[in-house]
Image (cartoon, rainbow, N blue to C red):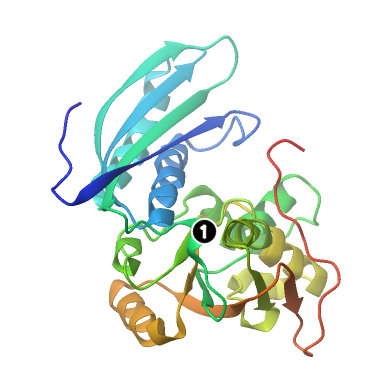
Amino acid sequence: GIFSVQPGFQLAVSTDTLIEGRHFYADTDPEDLGHKALAVNLSDLSAVGARPRGCLLALSLPAVDIQWLEQFSAGFLALAQAADCLLIGGDTTRSVQGISMTVTVLGEVPIAQALLRNRALPEDDIWVTGALGGPFTALQMLAGRWPRDEQVLAQVLPRLQRPVPPYQWAPELIGHAHAAIDISDGLVQDLGHILQASQCGAELFFDRLPLHDALGQCSQTQRMEAALGGGDEFGLCFTAPQGSRAYVLDSARKAGVAVERVGVITRGDVLTVYGADGSPIDSVFEGFDHFS
């Protein structure tokens, strides 16, 4: 596929691979899988404030299953259409074992204005989109690590299977936010990447975190683990100067995006999470490590 980027813009590119047994279960609904394969990549574009333009899909399948392919394509193409992110090419090959898929997304962002991890400044507000903890709760119950509650699982499963990153709204943060990252490995770990790159610290307030409604059924420890360490969110964590508060709230409201101010960037290199009683939480959950 060939396309041009409009004058004054740069190309933003991101690639993600999903592997059966590692990133999704073999019995995952193909339509959900098609949606998620693209969504996790749109999330990466959101993290730099890029507007989606096109994508490439490489699929490896052990055997040709027409029904599976039709359902997968329906999920993928529905989101591609909604995001105005045209499928412009790709490849299909036979795999030795299991399904794997690699998606590359292309987006555009104004030259030298991308939201980067190293731009956070002391006194910046820390913001989070969406609600936290749903996907992690679903994974813990599916894996048998937490007691399985069918009612809770029914509420959180859609957040795991069909994430909706704020891909349409993120470009509106250009010129207002400083640093951003998408929450894929857990809030603490992903915010930690911003802090490391920006050489700052942070204070997070647990009672300000937007928790998924279903977490009301979980214990306090489970809520903390899910909200602070739970990955697969694909919402946005970003920092912005205090002067941008009104803009962030107003533009998010117009775009129908839930956004919450959850902390502040500080000088130094320490991330402290405060509980509802104002005292620091000792055990800060680290999040997901791809190579652990």
Residue at the location (56% across, 52% down)? Answer: 160
Q: Residue at x 78, y 66 (%)?
A: 222
Q: Position of residue 73 (x, y in %)?
A: 34, 32
Q: In which image quadrant can residue 133 be found?
A: bottom right
Percent x, y of residue 92: 38, 16
* Horizontal side of residue 124 vs 84, given as left or right: right
Q: Secondary structure at mark 1?
A: helix
Residue 235 in view: no
Q: Which amino acid does the dot numbered 1 rest on?
A: Asn
Comparing 85 with 214, the one in front is 85
Q: Which residue is at the far right?
A: 282
Q: Residue at x 16, y 34 (%)?
A: 3
Q: Disc 1 designates what residue?
A: 118
Examine the rendered structure and indicate whether residue 270 appears above or below residue 142: below
For disc 1, the neighbor class at 10 Å (few under 14, some 14 to 19, many from 20) is some
In this rendering, the answer to whether 143 lies above or below 255 is above
Quadrant of the frame with the C terminus: top right
- The residue at the point 73 percent across, 52 percent down is 141
Q: Nearer the viewer, residue 195 or 204?
A: 195
Residue 265, how many percent across, how many down? 60, 75
Question: Is residue 51 shown left or right of residue 62?
Answer: left
